[in-house]
Image: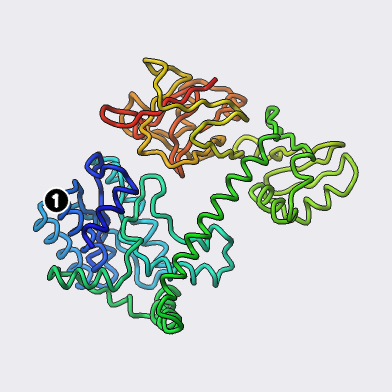
Amino acid sequence: MVQRFSDHIVSLLGTPNKHRFLLGVSGGVDSVVLAHLLHTLQIDFGIAHVNYALRGADSDADEQLVRDLAASLDVACHVTQAPIAPAASGIQEKARDLRYQWFEEVLESNAYDTLLTAHHADDQLETLFMRLTRGSGLEGLGGIHGKRGTLVRPLLPFRKDEILAYAKAQKLNWREDVSNSSTQYLRNAIRHKLLPSFMELSPDAATNTLTSMQHLRDAFEGILSQLQHIKTDWKQHGEALRIPFSSIDGLHPKSFWLHHLFAPYGFDVKEVEKLLNTHAGKKCTGEKYMLTRERNHLILMPTAATAATEQDYFLVPEEGIETPIKLKISADVIVSQPTAKCAFLDKEKLDFPLILRRWRSGDVFYPSGMTGKKKVAKFFKDEKMSSLDKKQQWLLCSGDNIVWLVGKRINRKFEAVANTTTLQIQLV
């Protein structure tokens, strides 16, 4: 298992020793095994644990086990107490939100660059069935991503029984959360009731299902790529997006592609089809956007109430993008010094395709040349940018993380440093 794990984490991150990892550890077998694997491979990491005080002495015992584990491995241990009332609704969601919010704070304040969690293959299967019950689309049914932004899940290829076997062979200590045996939560009900019966259908049921989920993730990536290709003829004119009929007339099946093209803007496919089959001048107004039919094209614009904050999204592949702005991406450094229109970024920290979007309220980044983080809105204010300038400002993102306020300032967490693969991104 050690060699397989080593090969997999290299495939995800390149050279692991170039990173400082923060590992979320609950005290359960999965995260304990992940800590042991990292230690065995002499990978630099620290441990983080959240005590929600939901189970009294048991919660405190979990915390103590984590502290003892960190001490035995001689790694840093970060612990916080974030009590949640046992009677609170949505306990799992609240705990997850608290956990990840605090993990981000620890990452920033302790110079870690990557967060690791111990999700594994059985978690993938549970996630699939959970999302099936909720009517998820193709992206949701693809399950959990192994890497997204600064979050990495290196145990996804491993089944629970493999993890348990490793823990027993290494004589590791861990604790079982008694709440995991309760079927009042949907995930637990799937784990204890549905999955055992499902596995009995075929000895290859789990393996084949996980393979199918990978196919779904690949298919969704293919759809995203094709959507970007379709949108190459869509032209931005100020706040308006001009959509020629020629870019959508030949799509098949048309309803499928219209859904993926216009659902992000809040339009139902039937509304779009109706607009396409009426005369010029007709409009369809959604909560955030207005779609207008012209003679040979559609015009998409933010509604007046949200024009200042609404975003358009464009995927940016590794070769760059031509529209709505031209970004040239190269691994061959051309300009010796960064400029307002030229950024040098660490390729290993970028998750392609990148996303080009407008700013939105609440956006935060870590400006180069400064300490701490800053709201993009505050950066705009300090730069004395007009309302129009704010609306026209593009943000280049990797996943949910802002990488570059294009033409303004990069996020120092993605800044190229010595001994990293440098990408030069130019605003042409």
What residue do we see at 25% from left, 62% from top?
31
Locate residue 327, reporting x and y percent. 53, 26
Which part of the image, by quadrant, shows the N terminus? Answer: bottom left
Furthest residue to the top? 336
Locate residue 387, reporting x and y percent. 60, 26
Q: Toward which corner of the image does residue 333 lie, by quadrant?
A: top left
Foreground of the two, 53 or 202: 202
Locate residue 160, reporting x and y percent. 31, 71
Furthest residue to the right? 279
Foreground of the two, 417 or 313: 417
| Dot 1 alpha-carbon crowd within 10 angstroms: few under 14, some 14 to 19, many 20 or more | some
Residue to which mark 1 is pinned: 75
In this view, 34 is above or below 396: below
In this view, 32 is above or below 220: below
What residue do we see at 78% from left, 39% from top?
246
Foreground of the two, 157 or 401: 157
Could you tell whether 26 is left or right of 70 in the image?
right
What residue do we see at 24% from left, 39% from top?
18
Q: Amino acid at mark 1?
A: Val
What residue do we see at 14% from left, 56% from top?
70
Foreground of the two, 34 or 291: 34
Q: Secondary structure at mark 1?
A: loop
Could you tell whether 75 is left or right of 135 in the image?
left
Locate residue 104, reporting x and y percent. 33, 46
Which part of the image, by quadrant, shows the C terminus? Answer: top right
